[in-house]
Image: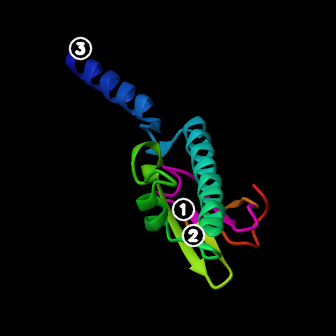
Amino acid sequence: MKRSLSLIFSLGLMATIAGCDIKTNRQVPQVNVANELAVTMRLRAIADAEAFYFAESGGSYATLDELVEKGYVPDPSGGKLDGYRFDVRVKLDGFEATAVPKKFGITGRRSFYIDETKVLRGADKGGDPATASDPQA
């Protein structure tokens, strides 16, 4: 009996440390908010890096790989931001950067979008990417 209680306590403690509710296997709200804050800060950094790249290149934008390679932004696939999938798409006259939870409801609920206007947008998209038509975040 003691061993069973100890195991249950240990599993609950590990889930709490990981920010996950053991009963529902869902992320606790405070962790989602922290993840989303980190993601929005990274998207703003990507938009700033794109503006710098635009000025330096004479009028073009870069992919995420190019921004990381040049050292303008750190690779978002590590650390806390590993729970979100980032994408930067270069358009003829701009760029679109998105961040989508890898495991909707567990690593985050909202998806985010930013472009050359630097207006951050976000919404609960059920795991789909946010767009320019979503509300300002």
Residue 99 picture quarter: bottom right
Rendering coords of residue 4 (x, y %) = 24, 22
- Name the residue that disc number 2 marks: 128
* Quadrant in which the N terminus appears: top left
Amino acid type shown at disc 2: Asp
Task: Confirm whether residue 102 shows in the render.
Answer: no
Closer to the camera: disc 2 or disc 3?
2
Mark 2 is surrounded, within 10 Å at the Cα level, by few (under 14), some (14 to 19) or many (20 or more) other residues, namely: some
Please report the bounds of the magenta region as a residue range: 98-118
Which of the two residues, 116 or 112, is positioned nearer the viewer here?
Answer: 116
Under tag 1, what secondary structure? strand
- Dot 1 crowding, Cα within 10 Å, few <14, some 14–19, many 20+: many
Q: Amino acid at mark 3?
A: Lys
The quadrant in which the C terminus is found is bottom right
Q: CA distance from mark 2 to mark 3?
A: 45 Å
The reply to whether dot 1 and dot 3 touch (C-beta < 8 Å) is no
